[in-house]
Amino acid sequence: MFALSYADPMHALVVGAGAVGQVFGYHLARSGAEVAFLVKPAHAAQCRRGLTLFCLNERGAPRRRFEDFAVLTSPDDARGTAFDQVYLAVPSTALRPGDWIAPLARATGDATVVFLPPNLDDRVLVSQAVSAERLVDGMIGFLSYWAPLPGESRFAEPGMAYWFPPLSPSPFSGATARVEAVVDALGRGGLPAVRRPDITRSLPFPNAILYAYLAALELANWSFATLRRGGRLGLASRAASEAMAIAAHTIGVSVPLRMRAAAWPLTIRAALRFAPWVVPLPLEPYVRVHFTKVGGQVRLGLHTYLDLGAKAGLDTAALAELTLALPAATSALR
């Protein structure tokens, strides 16, 4: 039986040392956990040199060095440590190639597996290798990026910059003891986190809206002003509504009214106009750089909606028009 205990230092394995993995790993280490990263062999040497982070919630975003961690390059490397928590901090596209999830699940024993990738069918893929009682579902509640962005001059050296929006802790759900252990470890390390009853019933809807409008924004050459003036704004709204209907059908719930309202063009216009004044980073360059890098994940998510919608006999006309207009892209995985 799993039980929460701090008799010994907690051992945490973070899969991926990119924009998400670095933030989780750093704050887990701040909580007193012994942290290891599992990365591709090509990234191991760079990771072992240590990480530089800048928290934009701190005045002046002071430089923080993170060096006290282990670096693994194969799931089998995890067998030497009794890990308590494993964080899958990789994009959806990294879950598909190769057979590494099942070996990792076996190598980490009864460790809690914190599941973060956002696409609609990702959980089914992971649950084929990880038993349901070990899974904790999570949602990333912060922005992070490789700094500096184009035109950004406040950092003396490159590093990972990140920001925790006010009143928006990262939510987690699953077996009570496991979720409480995750939320406690992250909270003690300074990463806002909260337990929720079942985020699997709400998580797909923000992503459905996000992916539709990201596609429209890319077609607007990543210009907020161009998208706000019209163009494909209406198409994106219809595509978002279709994607949410497909998500609702897939998980067996209704689309929440607040999510329907969030997809309206009027709502998005207001967000595009005012968000850059609220978010403490160059938002338009951030969106362009970050979501160009993970463009493969966005396209994979859009095609998943199309496939699931076709199987369910649901309308996908706007989704198809938007998706087919996008140029091909490959994601730069880490």
Image (cartoon, rainbow, N blue to C red):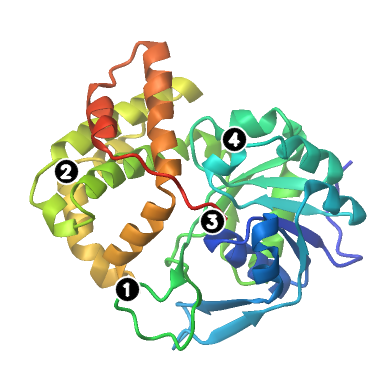
Instruction: In the rendered view, tell whether residue 181 sits above or below residue 215.
Output: below
Amino acid identity at mark 4: Arg
Reading the image, the residue beneath label 2 is 265
Mark 2 or mark 4, whichever is nearer to me: 4
Question: For mark 4, does the 10 Å Cα neighbourhood hold few (<14), some (14 to 19), or many (20 or more) residues?
Answer: few
Q: Residues within 10 Å of mark 1 (few under 14, many from 20)?
A: few
**Quadrant location, the C terminus:** bottom right
User: Mark 2 and mark 3: span between their CA atoms?
Assistant: 27 Å
Along the viewing direction, whichever of 327 and 196 lies nearer the viewer? 327
Q: Which of marks 2 and 3 is nearer the N terminus?
A: 3
Q: Position of residue 34 (x, y in %)?
A: 80, 68
Q: Which residue type does callout 2 highlight?
A: Pro
Separation of marks 4 and 3 at Cα, in angstroms = 25 Å
| Residue that carries the numbered disc 4 in the rendered image | 96
- Earlier in the chain: of badge 2 and badge 4, it is 4
Q: Distance between the residues labelled 1 and 2?
A: 28 Å
Label 1 sits on residue: 150
Say if mark 4 contacts mark 1, CB within 8 Å: no
Q: Distance between the residues labelled 3 and 1?
A: 28 Å
Q: Position of residue 16 (x, y in %)?
A: 63, 56
Screen quadrant of the N terminus:
top right
Q: Which tag is nearer the camera, tag 1 or tag 2?
A: 1
Coordinates of residue 118 in the picture (x, y in percent): 50, 42
Q: Earlier in the sequence, mark 4 or mark 3?
A: 4
Residue in front for this viewpoint, 236 or 2:
236
| Between discs 3 and 1, the one toward the N terminus | 1
Q: Are marks 2 and 3 in contact (CB under 8 Å)?
A: no
42 on left or right of 170? right
Q: Which mark is residue 170?
A: 3
Does residue 102 appear left or right of residue 219 in this picture?
A: right
Neighbourhood count class around disc 3 (C-alpha, 10 Å): few under 14, some 14–19, many 20 upward: many
Residue 42, image x, y percentages: 65, 59
